[in-house]
Amino acid sequence: MYEILKTINGPADVKKLNIGQLKTLAGDIREALFNRLTKIGGHCGPNFGIVETEIAMHYVFNSPEDKFVFDVSHQSYPHKMLTGRKAGYIDETHFKDDSGYTNPEESEHDLFNVGHTSTSVSLATGLAKARDLKGQKYNVVALIGDGSLSGGEALEALDFVGSDLNSNLIIIVNDNQQSIAEVHGGLYKNLAELRQTKGKSEHNFFKTLGLDYVYEENGNDIEAMIRILQKVKDTDHPIVVHINTQKGKGFELAEKNREAWHWCMPFDRETGCWNVTFPAESYTGLTAQYVMNKAKSDKDFVVITPAMPMTAGLSLDLRQQLGAQYVDTGITEEHAVAMASGVAKTGGKPLLVTNATFIQRTYDQISQDVCINNNPVTILLNYASFEGLTDVTHLGIFAIAAFSNIPNLVILSPTSKEEYLNMLDWSVEQKEHPVMILMPGNAVTSRAADKDFSAINTYKVEQAGEKIAILALGDFYQRGEELAQKITKELGFNPTLINPRFASGVDERLLADLQRNHQLIITLEDGVTEGGFGQKIAAFYADKNMKVKIYGLRKEFYDRYNPQELLKQLGMLPEQIIADIKKII
Amino acid sequence: MYEILKTINGPADVKKLNIGQLKTLAGDIREALFNRLTKIGGHCGPNFGIVETEIAMHYVFNSPEDKFVFDVSHQSYPHKMLTGRKAGYIDETHFKDDSGYTNPEESEHDLFNVGHTSTSVSLATGLAKARDLKGQKYNVVALIGDGSLSGGEALEALDFVGSDLNSNLIIIVNDNQQSIAEVHGGLYKNLAELRQTKGKSEHNFFKTLGLDYVYEENGNDIEAMIRILQKVKDTDHPIVVHINTQKGKGFELAEKNREAWHWCMPFDRETGCWNVTFPAESYTGLTAQYVMNKAKSDKDFVVITPAMPMTAGLSLDLRQQLGAQYVDTGITEEHAVAMASGVAKTGGKPLLVTNATFIQRTYDQISQDVCINNNPVTILLNYASFEGLTDVTHLGIFAIAAFSNIPNLVILSPTSKEEYLNMLDWSVEQKEHPVMILMPGNAVTSRAADKDFSAINTYKVEQAGEKIAILALGDFYQRGEELAQKITKELGFNPTLINPRFASGVDERLLADLQRNHQLIITLEDGVTEGGFGQKIAAFYADKNMKVKIYGLRKEFYDRYNPQELLKQLGMLPEQIIADIKKII
């Protein structure tokens, strides 16, 4: 097992091998992928498909003198195995040593922490520019593919490189004919035409941008990959190496169902069954139900997603049922948001769905295309919680801080299934406001909820009490409830418990009213506090006689943390908060 | 004067004219452009060049049933004149009725408030999608050009439209061979090749994305433009109409010097001399001096700008002197920021310069490509002040709220010439932090300043006093000084005056120390307070015995305001603040 892989401690060891041994190494790497992925999950198809390419990269180039930049970097597992980190794949006790993305803290062979798409060409261009300024000579190689090519940042970079960088830059376009879901965009049709013509079609997207171009049909053939990379090594100008690979190569299930196996939970290798059980009811599932019902009854309703249909539970089958009422724009967050604004302008009812971390790319579109124009777009974000994705590049904890300070945008934080669905429906139907809804990150709970949210920034008092008022926002409402009960029990009075519902504004009348019989306000929010909800409350009371204690996350790039341990570190457990209270009142 | 233009009260009046009259109308419109621009300035070259196109658009299509979307919309003056707003151009008393951009509040013929580039195709795609869902029939026309084509949002949209929108959408690409400064990017080379071949080259960027394409060589010929638009009207699929126009057409100076006349201040028509005097010393000029000196002495130093060289005072002559140490990426903010991160990664010293409003497009790149990687990029922003650009689409007042809540980013707010230059130099040289510097928006002032800012979040006490501490951030420092003097005079004690320097963090030790002999903190900041600096201070004191009064702008999309009047409305004049103080202490 891992006969050759065990001998690899760095790229130098790869270069010693003959072709037969390199092929055995590819097999070893796939076994190691199975070993890690079946036990802890991760990105599956992208890594199985890129094994030969990354072996060839390390065989031909000299990392770290030559610089590799991996787009999204979720396909960097083979590269990691070849650069001293095989233990993270073949030895279960070391799985946690490696993140699922490139990480400069792990290795000098990783240049950037990368988790969002379409960044590699720009980053690599910067490396090339610094090299040229210093008069140095080495290769800079960007590996991009898997859907990333349609992102604006990548397109901007390709356009720039095509004319303004007159030095070495090798852009490997890994064409596996699949984004996360199916591919979209005219560019992918051009890639298909280039594959069919073995790179010879006169219609060549890259060439129209001024880029040199070569094609390799056999991207999963080590010899072919070595040959083509040797050909472009030390080039004196930018060149695109378009390679045709098989996503999921070597794992039959992943080859057949490329979308389902893009990323996986721990699974049984033989059956492909994931070794996890999902809750019978989830906010994602509820969203899918809502979407399907709404679409049937209202032809103006349209779901738009930048390649993230599963954040709304929209499986391929459901997408097909939606027909023209479903638009996957591909990985194009900016275009998706602006398009939604256009749809809303003339009476359409757009629901844009994606992950909180990815919506960051549309700060400007939300501000300019949507909010200045005050068009009634609904943006629904999944994983906007500290309990969601915990990789540093995928944190959803910045959503409130980033977007709650944009005028006109109404951010809704629902606290239960009923409130969530009512907010969704209200938002899609109303014509007055751009709305962002933060899908709760906790388990589904049930509580009666209002149906009308048109009185913007009106908080809901769920329990009227005294001395202390708890403002428990969104999916932290249940924590507020628990805290309120503990206060009653331990301190002997009933605090006020408030469901703010609106993360983006202040209920000034209610807050003023609380001054009558409260001396301390506690805010709880599922996100960083700087720029967030609690600071708005503190600002309201800043020149008044009221103490405010803000609970939430710090302004930090947390990475692969345990959510419950983090809460404790932040002093957010109910008993910790009660200890704080005792000090203040 | 304005013989034909005077008869035009809407598009219907344009349709009545014969070709000869339409040509006279074009002349009238140019006269009206001169009338407005010589007196109040505005976008010049883009409007002179597009006169015939917009006449033809209104002649051929039926706005507002057919929908026009203008990219950036700084070229919409002729359109405005043809849609009932000629008074804003021919009658000085009505100049202020019209903004310099499309504005739905002005006319049903304007669909969006637009001021940032590269949005038109996405917005138009949304209109087309809503139309198709409703089963309606009309033309949707996007007019894009003038450099906007290289922006990621536009490229994403073109890619999407090329394959996924199978209905009417007409994209007029106004090719005037000029961005604001010179054009960059391979795409522009392809446009040149298409011009040279009269649209026949087999290398066609648009066609590689699956778009239909036609070319019109004579974009300033009304008959030709009418002919080509009639040809594509009612098309059942997306089509690109590539037109060749002359930027500044009909104004000789603007034809010759296209960059200088892209936008203008009031000027003398004969001499071209601008009727304004600039201060002998400006922060822009100081920046240019710094850049030139630094570049000479340090070959690792490179200025990167997404098409905004003049924000750093870099005229064409200076850019040429900088050679390889100057990179204009074209209108590609995302790529520019990520490229800067790459440059910094391997020891280059990148200084990225642009306007505060445009950096919004890079929230995600600053967070992910720069700050998670903690690469020492310096981002220098001009017009990050309420005294800068006052159009709603160009406000710089959101910079602190948007970016001060991103971990690792150090935002510096200098208070004088010396501090500004020292901060610039410190930032470019250090290797520990990504830094954003907000160029002061007030007149240049001189004060001694520190040279080392490596003690992050250390505020500077400029005057130690009692009772009240004024935290006067950046270019509001001088307002703080004035307030301090007034307090001494009117209230009879010396307040503490603090120059925070760091807009992105809190000096916890100093703030704690202030509790000894202060009872009120006043924060002054040049931006919206929500998510901004003052709220961080209020949050620090929220559970302590200290009152905080936060002064700054509200979370609002202000539009074409008078800065001094706004200050008064906000209660920020020194006498107003003193009245507040008297109420609190």
Image (cartoon, coloured by chain):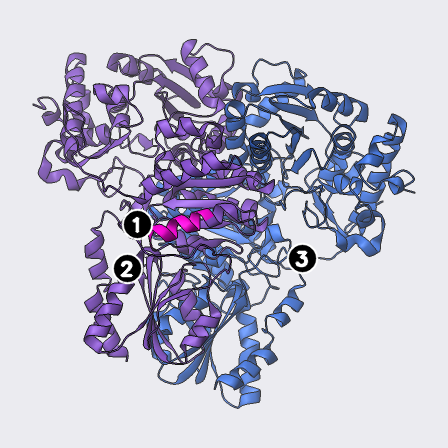
Chain colours: A blue, B purple
List the residue tagged with mark 2. Answer: B478
Residue A55 left/right relative to B386:
right
Subunit that carries the residue with mark 2: B
Q: Indicate which disc residue B441 carries.
A: 1
Same chain? Circles 1 and 2 = yes
Q: Overall secondary structure of the magenta stretch?
A: helix
Q: Is residue B142 visible?
A: no
The verdict on residue B88 being magenta is no
User: Label 1 crowding class (10 Å Cα cut-off): few <14, some 14-19, many 20+?
Assistant: many
Q: Indicate which disc residue A526 carries.
A: none
Q: Is residue B200 visible?
A: yes
User: Label 3 crowding class (10 Å Cα cut-off): few <14, some 14-19, many 20+?
Assistant: some
Same chain? Circles 2 and 3 = no
Disc with the residue nearer the chain's start (1 vs 2): 1
Start-end of magenta stretch: B416-425
Subunit that carries the residue with mark 1: B
Real-space CA distance between mark 3 and mark 1, rounded to the nearest whole angstrom: 41 Å
Location of residue B138 in the rendering, given as x and y in whole percent from the top left corner: 34, 29
Observer-nearest residue: B162 or B344? B344
The verdict on residue B419 being magenta is yes
Real-space CA distance between mark 2 and mark 3, rounded to the nearest whole angstrom: 45 Å
List the residue tagged with mark 3. Answer: A560
- Is the residue A258 above or below the residue A582 in the image? above
Image quadrant containing the N terminus of chain A:
top right
